[in-house]
Image (cartoon, grey):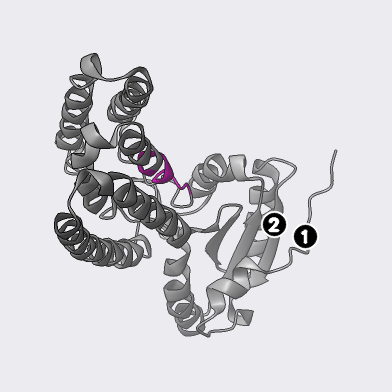
Amino acid sequence: MPNKYKIRLLRINLLAAAVALALWTPAASPPAALVLWLSVGWLFITALLLDFSHRYSRGRPWQLLPGALLLGLIAVAPERHGLLIWAWAALFMLPQMSWVAAFNISAGLLSAILIAPQLSTPAWLLMIISLTILCVLALARAQQLIDMNGAIRQRLRLIPGLNLWAGEQLVRDIQREQTRCAREGIYGELLILRMKRHQLWPTAKKLCELTHDFENVYRLDGTTLATLMLSRSAPEAQERYRSVLNALPDNISIDPVELMDVPLNASTLASLCRWQTSVVREQP
């Protein structure tokens, strides 16, 4: 299957950067060589482990590591590695959390101060102005990517081949399924499942197997799933609920809510995430 996410090209670029840094190490001082080899190792391991995954954690502040390594390279030998100051513009193109961006901005300013003795005042000021413009453009581009990726994730099938969707899709589906229940006289039920974080993905796969092809499963947060189950009657819905209850691990709690009782408002998803589970399985 062709890699439409261009992972191979990105892996080649990372390996090329690792080789370029490795070529700097022979003539470097011991502290500089240590930071260089740490950077080479990080680039090499990242290239080997790089893969596209819908399970990637957006909350992991991995951008701290390249920022710290870049600051370290400039700090240990500013007269030799001053050219790396321009790499900050590339680093700011990466989508990152606000506090991580604040750390990298501070590290970038510190890097500029460290190389100031190597430049004349006019040259240093010109560099600061040019680098600031590039970094602002990079941050603006990163924010565009954050907004675009956020909109995509709201409509994302989280595991290819399974009816597992982001929680925002549930907000759109509730009104549609409520209308279907009222029009066709069927019974709709919303099941909210809470579990430990490491159980989320196995439980999501199992829940997709326990529901029909036309019924979706939704990830509300790292410990909460939901599904809309459509049945001919309330007794049939109760029977299906029991089958789901018996098929899942004992420490998972399930809260069944009649679909017509779910309020329709802009904060539905946030309300569902805070919903208190009232049905907890008894321990054997």
**Disc assigned to residue 279:** 1
Q: Quadrant of the N terminus?
A: top left
- Residue 254 picture location, percent across and down: 69, 57
Number of marks drawn? 2
Residue 180 falls in image quadrant: bottom left
Q: Residue at x 56, y 52 (%)?
A: 222
N-terminal-most mark, 1 or 2: 2
Task: Inspect this view and state whether residue 209 appears.
Answer: yes
Residue 260 falls in image quadrant: bottom right
Task: Look at the numbered disc 2 and give the secondary structure of its residue.
Answer: strand
Kind of residue at badge 2 = Ile
Residue 50 falls in image quadrant: top left
Contact flag, marks 1 and 2 (Cβ < 8 Å):
yes
- Circle 2 residue: 254
- Residue 264 picture location, percent across and down: 53, 84
**In front of the other: 7 or 227:** 7
Q: Residue at x 17, y 56 (%)?
A: 127
Task: Using the image, determine if residue 47 lies above or below residue 165.
Answer: above
Task: Answer with left or right where residue 126 lies relative to residue 184.
Answer: left
Task: Inspect this view and state whether residue 157 appears.
Answer: no
Spatial CA distance of label 1 from label 2 is: 6 Å
Task: Answer with left or right where residue 72 lies relative to residue 271.
Answer: left
Q: Which residues are magenta?
A: 60-67
Q: Does the magenta-highlighted stretch encompass residue 217? A: no
- Residue 152 picture location, percent across and down: 31, 62
Kind of residue at badge 1 = Val
Label 1 Cα neighbours within 10 Å, binned few <14 / some 14-19 / many ≥20: few
Task: Using the image, determine if residue 131 lies above or below residue 3.
Answer: below
Q: Residue at x 66, y 45 (%)?
A: 196
Task: Using the image, determine if residue 156 lies above or below residue 250.
Answer: below
